[in-house]
Image (cartoon, rainbow, N blue to C red):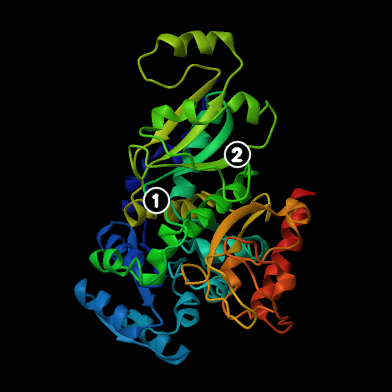
């Protein structure tokens, strides 16, 4: 039997070089990741940076100037159209305006705005642009809603390559192809302090030119929870307990001393999402796979890599490279109509608020990475056994407590004053309904 040569058989750089016109991409959110994406788009053959936006216009301007771009500041649809005719890169403080560029093929959302990120994605979809999310906060809360809208428009909605969730997905794809069943999908975290806050973390954040609140969310584990919830919602995973287990080990190869996989997982079970703390190599990701096949177990018992005693085996990647890796999925969305990672199994998990200190009635929650709460990822179908519906940390900003909450206690929706007109929650409810249909 002979096979015809399909486009996928051609190396991606070659395909990009052969394009009649480059893939036009706009980036919304010019922080550390957004700057990296703009750099990568400007320097990678086959791509064109069409527009950039940040709520802080100065950040977008500095990015354009650093790259030596011919750019034009735009504040309206008319000015945007003029910049496109002139061939200038559009620069704006209006993310929705840039996301909806008619001359773009793809919008990359790289801000950390939750409802704002969702609105940018909606604007992109309305204009016929594929959506690549590097904003995992908006993806976690509103991914099912955005995925449904993109599908209805014949567009691709995907998380970006280069971050832990998509790197984990690549590992999963490999081991499933090899005949292994995914058991645990994991992150390798270097440091964890539940009670970190923007003030405590400021010296370390300043060394890395990071926003203090964002850096606190990395340190207190909330951002980790977001990433692993995104993985669970894409691949049908679950947590073993609220907040995951997170044992401290010296090396990833010590993982079999930290988890009893036989006790916590049986063939056919959903994969568990979790993490290890302090393990070398820091910054990597891992997957535990299972095979019942004696032939494979025999082979792996003498093969040089230290993968485990069997029937559970360790697969890991020691790094993830953020913006450096991100453009592959952009090309795949346009050229192959494929997504790397999306909330295909609905909203199975979410990150819920727990009190960083004793809180009193009248306190107003200040969101992820703030002074008042840390976030634990939970299985949503276990909410009743945990006391009721927890407050999603990513949209808790501004909610006022009706009663006292003790340090480390879980915060319930019923503990907060109702805000029936809050679009953040109405869109979240929509995503819950859509997600439930995905698992029905």
Q: Which residue is mark 2?
A: 272
Residue drawn 49% across the image and 34% down it: 287
Can you say whether 204 is above or below 311 in the image? below
Of 330 and 369, the residue lying toward us: 369
Q: Quadrant of the N terminus?
A: top right
How many labels sit on residues? 2
Which picture quadrant has residue 111? bottom left
Q: Residues within 10 Å of mark 2 (few under 14, many from 20)?
A: many
Percent x, y of residue 204: 28, 63
- Where is residue 71 shown, x and y percent of the image? 28, 81
Residue that badge 1 annotates: 162
Given residues 64 and 364, the one toward you in this image is 364
Q: CA distance from mark 2 to mark 1?
A: 21 Å
Judged from the image, the secondary structure of the residue bearing numbered disc 1 is: loop
Q: Is residue 327 visible?
A: yes
**For this view, does 346 lie left or right of residue 87?**
right
Please tell me whether residue 425 is drawn above or below residue 33 in the rendered image. below
Q: Residue placed at 46% from the left, 30% from the top?
A: 255
């Amino acid at each position: 039997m002979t096979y015809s040569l399909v486009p996928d058989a051609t190396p991606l750089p070659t395909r990009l070089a052969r394009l009649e016109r480059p893939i036009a991409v706009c980036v919304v959110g010019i922080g550390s990741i957004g700057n990296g994406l703009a750099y990568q788009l400007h320097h990678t053959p086959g791509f064109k940076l069409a527009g950039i936006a940040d709520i802080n216009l100065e950040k977008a301007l500095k990015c354009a100037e650093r790259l030596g771009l011919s750019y034009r500041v735009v504040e309206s649809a008319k000015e945007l159209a003029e910049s496109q005719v002139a061939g200038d890169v559009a620069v704006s403080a209006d993310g929705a305006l840039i996301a909806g560029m008619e001359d773009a093929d793809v919008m990359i959302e790289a801000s950390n705005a939750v409802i704002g990120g969702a609105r940018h994605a909606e604007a992109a979809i309305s204009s016929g642009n594929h959506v690549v999310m590097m904003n995992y906060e908006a993806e976690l809360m509103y991914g099912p809603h955005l995925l449904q809208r993109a599908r209805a428009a014949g567009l691709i909605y995907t998380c970006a390559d280069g971050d832990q969730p998509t790197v984990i997905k690549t590992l999963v794809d490999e081991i499933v192809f090899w005949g292994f069943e995914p058991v645990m999908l994991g992150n390798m975290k270097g440091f964890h302090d539940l009670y970190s806050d923007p003030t405590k973390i400021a010296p370390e954040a300043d060394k890395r030119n990071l926003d203090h609140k964002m850096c606190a969310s990395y340190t207190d584990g909330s951002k980790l929870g977001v990433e692993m919830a995104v993985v669970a919602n894409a691949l049908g995973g679950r947590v073993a307990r609220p907040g995951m287990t997170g044992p401290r080990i010296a090396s990833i190869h010590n993982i079999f001393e930290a988890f009893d996989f036989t006790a916590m997982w049986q063939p056919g079970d959903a994969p568990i999402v979790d993490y290890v703390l302090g393990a070398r190599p820091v910054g990597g990701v891992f997957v535990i796979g299972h095979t019942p096949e004696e032939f494979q177990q025999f082979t792996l018992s003498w093969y040089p890599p230290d993968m485990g005693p069997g029937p559970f085996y360790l697969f890991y990647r020691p790094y993830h490279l953020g913006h450096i890796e991100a453009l592959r999925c952009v090309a795949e969305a346009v050229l192959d109509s494929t997504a790397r990672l999306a909330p295909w199994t609905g909203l199975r998990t979410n990150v819920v608020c727990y009190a960083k200190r004793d809180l009193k009635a009248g306190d107003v929650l200040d969101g992820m990475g703030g002074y008042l709460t840390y976030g634990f990822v939970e299985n949503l179908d276990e909410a009743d056994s945990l006391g009721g519906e927890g407050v999603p940390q990513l949209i808790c900003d501004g909610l006022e407590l009706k009663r006292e909450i003790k340090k480390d206690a879980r915060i319930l929706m019923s503990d907060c004053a109702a805000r029936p007109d809050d679009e953040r929650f109405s869109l979240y409810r929509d995503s819950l309904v859509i997600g439930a249909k995905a698992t029905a």
